[in-house]
Image: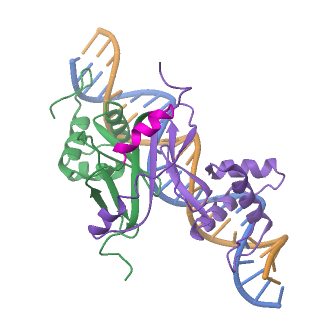
Chain colours: A green, B purple, C orange, D blue
Amino acid sequence: MDNWPEGMKKTKQRKAVLSVLEQVDKPLSASEVCSKLEANEEPAWLSTVYRILELFVEKEMVVKTNVLNNISVYELNRHKHKHYAICMKCNKMIRMNNCPMIEFVPELEDQKFSVVGHNLEVFGFCIDCKPH
Amino acid sequence: MDNWPEGMKKTKQRKAVLSVLEQVDKPLSASEVCSKLEANEEPAWLSTVYRILELFVEKEMVVKTNVLNNISVYELNRHKHKHYAICMKCNKMIRMNNCPMIEFVPELEDQKFSVVGHNLEVFGFCIDCKPH
DNA sequence: ATTACTGCAAAGCATTTGCAGACTG
DNA sequence: CAGTCTGCAAATGCTTTGCAGTAAT
């Protein structure tokens, strides 16, 4: 709840959304955030949650990722890269420990492309769902 | 037009979609495919195009990728990895020449995750759109 | 007091689905 | 001819938008 960006109003809903993201340490969809808010008895409308999440993304407090089925998930920007392997059966997300892109960015910069960020998603089967 | 999967009916629409993908050598959205079909005077309904593209993905003739704005794009599976850098302003897609994931898969396999595939998208600004 | 934010409803858009008629093998 | 595929329409589901009232500074 510290590091609140200058000029951004501290509303009940925004604080509640941030607190949800701080608690979970994994990416959530907008509607998952909504459910958690309800569970915390701090309900907020889904469209409000979207607006707050997009605001957080813009302020770089939150990182947005698109997953296979065209759903966006959001997680706190802990200022280190995180990528996930997503199980195609149960949708479990397994965090990967390092980022294969690091040594890759310079090549692109050479090609006159200025890299702002990237998404990487790996899909397959987790141990519980792996077809024998 | 060769290598038609066994048992898959050769309809006019399927041949036309495949031919569009063969011609462009870059990923297209379903509706872009649709427009190209119209331009070729082989019109097909958008829902049909979706069905055909998803069929091709299933048959591994086509690779599907999700981009930032929750739109899926499809391109011919030329059996080598391709990844793109996407310009955040003009949406131009710049092909990257190699895949940073190759040396990365074994680490995941160690973690008891069986890797089927991956998507990687890099975003930033192309030379024409780069803020000075 | 001013300005920005939220609840709510409704729209927007990509994608999916159901069904009857048309086409392929 | 049997079974599949397509055109079409309508539904679905995530996300966005408009607006009037509410809350923050």
State the extent of the magenta-drawn residues as a range: A101-114
- Quadrant in the rendering for residue A3: top left
Q: Residue at x 77, y 52 (%)?
A: B37
Left or right, A8 with respect to B21, comes to left
Residue A35, given in percent of the width and then of the height, sits at 28, 53
Residue occupying the far left of the picture: A2
Vertical position of residue B26 compared to residue B130: above or below: below
Q: Nearer the viewer, residue B110 or B39?
A: B110
In front of the other: A78 or B125: B125
Q: Residue at x 39, y 59 (%)?
A: A122
Secondary structure that dominates the magenta span: helix
**Residue B59 in the image: x percent, y percent?**
60, 71
Quadrant including the C terminus of chain A: bottom left
Asked if one can make out residue A46 in the rendered structure from this viewpoint, the answer is no
Residue A112 shown in magenta: yes
- Residue at 39% x, 79% y: name it: A131
Q: In the image, is residue A69 above or below residue A65?
A: below
Q: Is residue A83 visible?
A: yes
Percent position of residue B81, x then y:
52, 57
